[in-house]
Image (tube, helix red, strand yellow):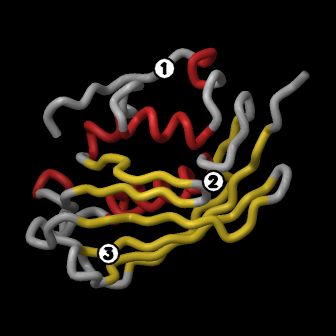
Amino acid sequence: MSGKTYGVVAPDVLKSYDGLGFLKAIIDGKVPNPPISELMGFHLVEAEQGRAVFEGVPEFHHYNPIGTVHGGFAATLLDSALGCAIFSTIAKGDTWTTLELKFNLVRPITKDTGPVRAEGRIVHRGRTLATSEGDLKDRAGKLYAHATTTCIIFPAKG
């Protein structure tokens, strides 16, 4: 996507935002998109408390040897959406990481599928553990994959 920048911010810059503020800064172009977005061809397009949405276009360079888009494309979009749904609830200075990701592919994705949208939604947010769920659909709303994740939250020290 033209006009987007890619990179990684310094840890002190990241910790100066709460999670939702950082996600909105990516969408607004105030901080760079992560390099994985450029590599895989997907981007964060919506973020609100407890919800995040990524969109991407499966292309021929995502293909596996059997002639369909590699399952890792769907897994990466879903991991991003589900993780960022949790990230949107993180306080300034807190950190987090994924503990577990479970996903199911329900139909093949090809370069002819067109744009797909991964939406993640919070299911549970505790003090140190959170879970979210989500799905990957095409523009017509056809389901291609769904997933759940568990993330651990590390409250800021001090």
Residue at 61%, 46% in the rendered image? 87
- At mark 2, the secondary structure is helix
Residue 107 image offset from top left, x and y in percent: 29, 83
- In three-dimensional space, the C-alpha distance between marks 2 and 1, rounded to whole angstroms, equals 19 Å
Residue at 57%, 70% in the rendered image? 133
Quadrant hosting residue 126? bottom right
The answer to whether one can see residue 67 in this image is no
Q: In this view, does 29 lie above or below 149?
A: above
Q: Earlier in the sequence, mark 1 or mark 3?
A: 1
Quadrant hosting residue 19? top right
The answer to whether one can see residue 55 in this image is yes
Mark 3, residue position: 137
- At mark 1, the secondary structure is loop
Residue 9: mark in rendering: 1
Mark 2, residue position: 86
Q: Which of marks 2 and 1 is nearer the N terminus?
A: 1
Left or right: 113, with 78 as reference point: left
Residue 36 image offset from top left, x and y in percent: 35, 38
- Mark 1 is on which residue type? Val
Q: Which of 94 and 78 is in front in this view?
A: 94
Quadrant hosting residue 150? bottom right
Left or right: 124, with 127 as reference point: left
For the C terminus, the image quarter is top right
- Mark 3 is on which residue type? Lys
Residue 66 image offset from top left, x and y in percent: 18, 70
Q: Which of marks 3 and 2 is nearer the N terminus?
A: 2
Residue 111 image offset from top left, x and y in percent: 11, 65
